[in-house]
Amino acid sequence: MTVAWPLAAVSRPVRLLATDLDGTLVGDSGMRVTLQHHLATLRPRTALVYVTGRSLVSTLRLIEAIGLLVPDRIVAGVGTAIHGGPEWQVDATWQHRLADGWQERRVRETAGCFADLRHQSPGEQTPLKCSYTLAAARAPAVLARLRAALAEAGLRARVIYSGGRDLDIVPVGAGKAAAVGYLGEHWGIAWSDVLVCGDSGNDRDMLSLPAQAVVVGNACDNLLQAPPAGAFVAGGRDAAGMLEGLQHFGWLAGG
Ligand code: GLC
Ligand code: MG
């Protein structure tokens, strides 16, 4: 993979911008290039972190394919892996923390009892992320039963449903919010200097952090109808919405 980590990166960033990719930074608003121009001017004092459900490989492919800025960290697999340079190696401390007490085999067995769940492709499965699809119409009933079954089996797992389709089961300590919190702490950045952006169910925990939160205008999974307290709900879609949010929170020059 030829996406090189920005070596000049940010040993001491003072702000952190953590954004989801699909439907948030990446979408159909046509504003991504303009947004990226602004983001580039914020660096290196602002650390840029992509926080996505995708795997590392799929994220790096997307970065290359459409020319995204190379971030300082990639939080992949819905907060189950944190990658940084120079080789995009995984953060072992984070990995060990999540693996503690996690019982992948039993989680998969429990989920396997639910006929409504379909496995996502092997490339989306990791030892810390069990991923399925589930039809939206079946979701309310099945999610409740699945959570109950996991709890009854004594499995400390989180069930995250996104986009009316994707279902991830991850360790309780995983998730986008926890990973962003870990990085903020690592860099010693106060919540008031953290901005998070997202559009779907797997972003809800991150958008509920005591940070500056931007829900983009195309958001789903009830984020528009019931946004997290204090979040800014943009009118514009994806990158256009992010630009509005950055402006709203005074992150743009003259903003
Ligand atoms: C991405 C991942 C998928 C996951 C979904 C929601 O699409 O590829 O595995 O279920 O995000 O988190
Ligand atoms: Mg998204």
Image (cartoon, grey):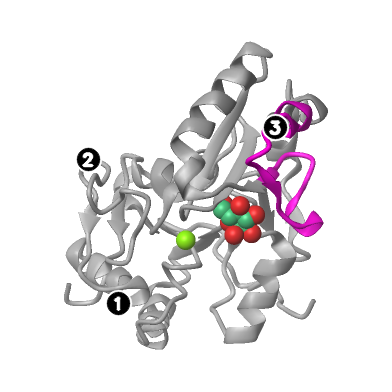
Determine whether the residue tagged by mark 2 lies in a helix, strand or loop.
Answer: loop
Q: Which residue is mark 3?
A: 111
Determine whether the residue tagged by mark 3 lies in a helix, strand or loop.
Answer: helix
Determine whether the residue tagged by mark 1 lies in a helix, strand or loop.
Answer: helix
Q: Which residue is mark 2?
A: 229
Type of the residue with mark 1: Ala
Say few, some or many: other residues with alpha carbon within 10 Å of mark 1 (under 14 / 14 to 19 / 20 or more). Answer: many
Which residue lies at the image location 50% right of the left edge and 67% below the top edge? 22
> What is the x, y in percent for residue 104?
78, 31
- Mark carried by residue 240: 1
Q: Could you tell whether 129 is left or right of 140 in the image? A: right
Inter-mark Cα distance, 2 to 3? 32 Å
Q: Could you tell whether 92 is left or right of 164 in the image? A: right
Q: Quadrant of residue 148?
A: top right
Could you tell me if the residues under marks 1 and 2 are in contact, i.e. CB atoms within 8 Å? no
> What is the x, y in percent for residue 142?
53, 33
